[in-house]
Amino acid sequence: MRYVHTNIISRDWQKLAEFYENVFNCKRVPPARDQGGDWLSVGTGVPDATLKGVHLRLPGYDDHGPTLEIYSYGHMLDKLPAAANRQGLGHLAFQVSNVEQVLKQVIQNEGKALGQVSSYSIPDQGLLTFVYCCDPENNIIELQNWDRS
C-alpha cells in the first residue's frame, strides 16, 4: 500500500495549478484530464459527472511520488469559508527554508495569510516556525520550517 495523491476541487483548475507551480515548484504530470461518463458518475456518486484538471508532482519527490490532483467538475457545490478548525481535511503542509519569504510569494500569487508567522521552541525537537495561509481558492496551506540546530 502507498499514498498516491491529494485532490483539490477548484473553480478554475488551470489558475490554481499555476499557483502551486509558481509558489511551490510543483511539476505537471501529463496528460491533462478531461473526463466524463457513466463510470465517473458511478464511482464518484455525482450524477452526470464531468471533470477537467491536472496532476502536479509535489516538490521533493521523484517521478513516482505523490501528486496534488487539481480538478474542476462541470457542476460544483459552493465552498465554505476557510477556517483552521473546520472539520474535514485541514491543510496541506510544505517544509520551506524561509516561512516569511514563501508567505510573501503566496500573497503575490493571489493567496492570503490566514494567521501570522509564529515560532515555538519544542524541547528535544528544535525551533518550529510556521504560518497558515490560503491559496487563491481559500484552501489552507501550512508553511513550516524546523531549525534543529
Image (cartoon, rainbow, N blue to C red):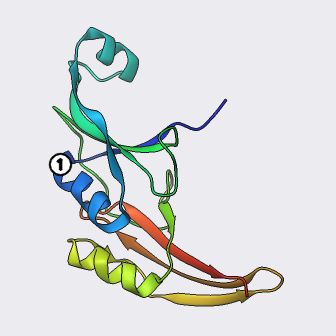
Q: Residue at x 38, y 85 (%)?
A: 101
Question: How would you rate the neighbour count of disc 1 (Cα within 10 Å): few for under 14, some for 14-19, many for 20 or more?
Answer: some
Residue placed furthest toward the top: 38
Residue placed furthest toward the right: 124
* In this picture, residue 109 sits left or right of residue 26: left
The residue wearing badge 1 is 14
Q: Residue at x 36, y 55 (%)?
A: 26
Q: Is residue 69 shown to the viewer in this render?
A: yes
Task: Give the secondary structure at mark 1.
Answer: helix
Residue nearest the observer in this picture, 131 or 60? 60
Mark 1 residue type: Gln
Residue nearest the observer in this picture, 93 or 146? 146
Quadrant placement of the C terminus: bottom right
* In this picture, residue 148 sits left or right of residue 71: right
Q: Residue at x 29, y 23 (%)?
A: 46
* Image x and y of residue 62, in percent: 51, 46
Q: Image quarter for residue 112?
A: bottom left
* Image x and y of residue 81, in percent: 31, 62
